[in-house]
Image (cartoon, rainbow, N blue to C red):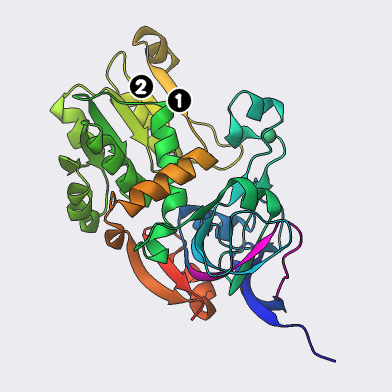
Amino acid sequence: MTSRPSMRVARLHGPEDLRIDTVPRPEPGPGEVRVRIEAALTGGTCAKMWRRGHHARLGTAPVAFGHEGAGVIDAVGSEVLGFEVGERVVPADSAPCGTCAACDRGLTAQCEAMVWLTGFFADALLVPARIVRTNLHKIPAGLAPESAALAESLATVIKGHDRTPARRGEHAVVIGTGVLGLLWIRVLTTSGVRVTAIGRRPERVATARAFGADAVLDAAAVARTKARVDLVVDAAGTPAASTLALELVSPGGRVHLFGGLAEGTTIALDAHRLHYAELLLTASFHHTPFHMAEALRLLGEGFVDTAALLETRVPLADLPAWMACTAQGGALKAVVVPG
Ligand SMILES: [Zn+2]
């Protein structure tokens, strides 16, 4: 009798309780593929999940951890079309159903029957059939797995930008100089928008400027410039940042709430100003298969200096300790490698 092969997967058992568990290696069923993970990324969502012990959209603990990564297909189930063993891929962390009322209106991030996928911090990952069909993407030649894994983050930014486009010649303020803030700076400046970044971390100033920001200031300094602000993007994801965004925008301008806040969070909103200054308030969540494909295409063309965002490499075995050190905020992305 042969024992079934096993593999390691990082699982969240509760708030701040991340463990590397050994589990049977999954075999792909009809329509599924198994991906040997080459690189997975930590990020703000991971930090939030780690602190809360769960994620609003991903069920309760224990939950397989990690939602961004890339690897090589090492097993293919029956009925899989278009993918073969040995291909380098990025599985998205979700796939909409395409048939519910939300999907029917094109709001696929609001799908009422979304399939979610976590467990990228592992030796291997079983990709559900629906993701294989609609949201599994081949990596452009020459793109490193850790760079390709940034597609998920970039896709959320491109989708947010689609929802609140900025026009050439406008001035935007981006609050937050984490990975998502930096990607917003890149996307906006590429569209011909002048960007001022608000960030507290001195070590990010050079990166923000390299991504295209004209200046990196604190909030008071931005207000003092009295420059017209057509768009403010809150990419910091704190109640204070959301309120600040509404204060900084000029009359007739737009505010985009991009950072996700915890359930039950309320923000102060100057309703008088919202009306009389005719502000437009938008938000966006997650991404779509279209934006995933677009993000990966852009990464393949070198749109983003990915090395500037990928701070360090962490062996899978060390991930629990790494999260405990960094989840309180401040870190850019770490590349987690099975090793
Ligand atoms: Zn749907």
Judged from this view, the residue extending furthest toward the top is 276
- Highlighted magenta segment, given as a residue range: 25-38
Q: Indicate the secondary structure of the residue bearing disc 2.
A: strand
| Earlier residue among tags 2 and 1 | 2
- Give amino acid for label 2: Arg
Q: Write down the residue under mark 1.
A: 282
Q: In the rendered image, which quarter contains the N terminus?
A: bottom right
Residue at image coords 72%, 39%: 113
Alpha carbon separation for disc pair 2 and 1: 7 Å
250 sits left or right of 12 in the view? left
Tell me if the residue at label 1 has its CB under 8 Å from ligand 1.
Answer: no
Q: Position of residue 43 (x, y in %)?
A: 45, 57
Residue 20 visible in this rendered orientation of the protein: no
Q: Quadrant of residue 114?
A: top right
Q: Is residue 176 above or below residue 195?
A: below
Residue contact at pointers 2 and 1, CB within 8 angstroms: yes
Q: Is residue 83 above or below residue 39?
A: above
